[in-house]
Image (tube, coloured by chain):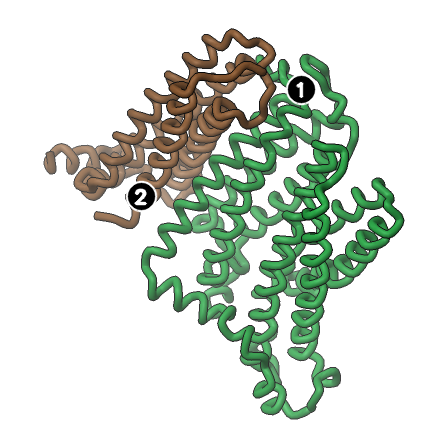
Chain colours: A green, B brown
Amino acid sequence: MPAVTLAHAHLLLNHVPTLGLIFAVALFLLSLVRRNDELLRASLGALFLVAIMAFPTFMTGYAARVAIRSHPGFSQPLTDAHQGAAVMALIVIEITGAGAWAALWQQRRHGFPRKWTLISVVVLSLISLGLVTRAANLGGDISHPEIRFTQDLHEAEAAVPNDVKGLTTPAISQIVTNYRYVWPICEVVHFIGLALLMGVVLVINLRVLGVGTLKGMDYRDVHKLLPWGVAGFTFNAISGMVFFIAQPQTYTLNLSFDLKMLAFVLAGVTVLYQTMFDELWTLTKYGGASRVAKFMAAAQITLWVGVLYFGRMIPYLTGGAEAGAL
Amino acid sequence: MSGFFQWLEDLPLSTSIAGSDELYGFALVLVLHTIGIALTAGPAAVMSLRLLGVGRPFPLASLRTLFTFFWIGFIGNAITGSLLFMMAATRTGHNPMYYAKLVCLLFGVVMLHRVHHAIERDSTQDGTGALRRSVMAVAVLCLVFWAGVITTGRLIAYTK
C-alpha cells in the first residue's frame, strides 16, 4: 500500500480554507441577517477553526512542492505564484480568525460582540474569501493545465501576478539573509510570545483543574487574561511564519515540526472549546469543573508543552531526506 | 578566568552532554531550559499584569500558587542553565550578553519578590481595591526585566 505523505495531506487540507471559508462566511452573514446569536457563535467558531487549519494547509504545501518538482511539466514560476498568493491569503485569514475569536470573547464578556468587531470580521472574511480563491486557482494551475486560461506553459508563467512575487520563499529568504538582525529579533519575539502564552495557559487551565489558591478565581474574571495569551500567540505566529518561509528546508518533512503542528491544531481546538461552550462560564469562585472541562484543561497544558517540546526538538528529531533540496 | 572556563568545559559532565547525539543529552537540557522559561517568565508576566489591573477583580491572593510553579521553573533553569554554560564556557563566559542576562535575572527576581510582597499584603480580598502607584511601577519593572532575561538569553547565541 503506498504511503500517505504530507503532499497527500496538502491535497486534503487545501479544501479547508476554500470550502470551509465559504461555509463559515455564509453562516456568518446569515447569522447577522437573522440576528441569531447561536448561529453567530457557531460561525465565529468556524472562522476561527479555518484560521487554525490554514497553518498546516500552508505548511504542507512545501511538501507537495518537493513531491512534484521532478514531474514533467513542473513550473517553478507557477508554484511560486501559488505560494505568494497563499502567503497573502494566510495573513488575512489569520487576522480574520483573530477578529472572529475577539468577537467570541466579547460575546462572552459583554453579552454581544462590538459592532466594529463584527464589521471588521465581515470585511476581512470577504477579502479572505477572494484571496483564498485566487490562491486555490493558482494552485490548480500547477497540476491541471486543462483549467489554465492558456495551454501554453510559457504564456501562463508570463501572466503570473506581480503582487505575489515579493512573498515567495526566495524573496523572504533574501530579506532575512540581507538583514542579519531579522532572525535574532524574531527569535526574541518568539520566546517572549511563548512565555506570555504559557503564563496565561497555566493560570486559566490550573483554575479549571482547581489547583491550589487559583481555585478562588471566577472563570469569567480569569478569562479576561486570554487576550494576553492570544497576543503571545500572535507574536509566535508571526515570528514562526518568518522562520518557516525563510528556511522551509529546515521544517518541511521534519517529524518534530509535523508533531508540533499537530499539537498546535489540537491546542487550538481546546481554546475554542473554552470560549464557545457554556459550561465553564458558570464556574464561580471555588466551584468545581466537570470531568470534560478538566480533561480539556489538562489536554491544553499538555498540548502547549508538546508544541514547546517539539518546537525545540526540530533540529534533533529530523526526517525526510528530500527536504534539503527545496 | 579563561583557564577556569576551559576547565569547566573540559569536565566529563560537560563533554558527555555536549557530545551526546542522544535525545536525552544536549537536546533534553535545551528543552527543559525552555520549559523553565515558560514556568518562570510566564507566571511573572501574569502576576505583573494582574497588578496592573488586567483580569480585575479576581483576588490577588488567588495567584499565590503560581509562585510554586515559578520556583520549580527557576530551580530547574538554574540547573539546566549551569549545564548549558559549562558546555560552552569558553565562548559564553566572554560574552557580555551573558552577564547582561544575569543582571536582568537578578533584578527580575528582586522585582518578583516585591510582587510577591504586594500580593501577600493585599487587604482587598475581593480584588476590587485600587493598588498604589509604587506597586504598579514594580509590576512594570518586573515585566521589563523578565523580557530582558529572554531577550539577552536569546541574543547570547548571536553575539560574541
Q: Label 2 belongs to which residue?
A: B19
* Residue A44 position in % (x across, y down): 75, 47
Quarter holding residue A84: bottom right
Q: Nearer the viewer, residue B135 or A56?
A: B135
Q: Chain of mark 1?
A: A
**Residue at the image position 19 percent from the left and 38 percent from the top:** B93
Residue type pointed to by label 1: Asp
Residue visible at 65% across and 92% down in the picture:
A152
Residue nearest the viewer, comparing A264 with B136? B136
Q: Nearer the viewer, mark 1 or mark 2?
A: 1
Q: Is residue A193 above or below residue A153?
A: above
Q: Quadrant of the N terminus of chain A?
A: bottom right
- Horizontally, residue A326 falls left or right of residue A135, namely left
Locate residue B70 relative to residue A252 in the image: left or right.
left
Q: Secondary structure at mark 1?
A: loop
Q: Does residue A1 appear in the picture of this structure?
A: no
Q: Residue B41: x percent and y percent? A: 43, 30
Task: State the residue at coordinates (34%, 62%).
Answer: A179
Can you tell which mark lies on residue A218? Answer: 1
Instruction: Give the label on residue B32, or none.
Output: none
Which amino acid does the dot numbered 2 rest on?
A: Gly
Q: Looking at the picture, tell me which residue is in the foreground, A97 or A261.
A: A97
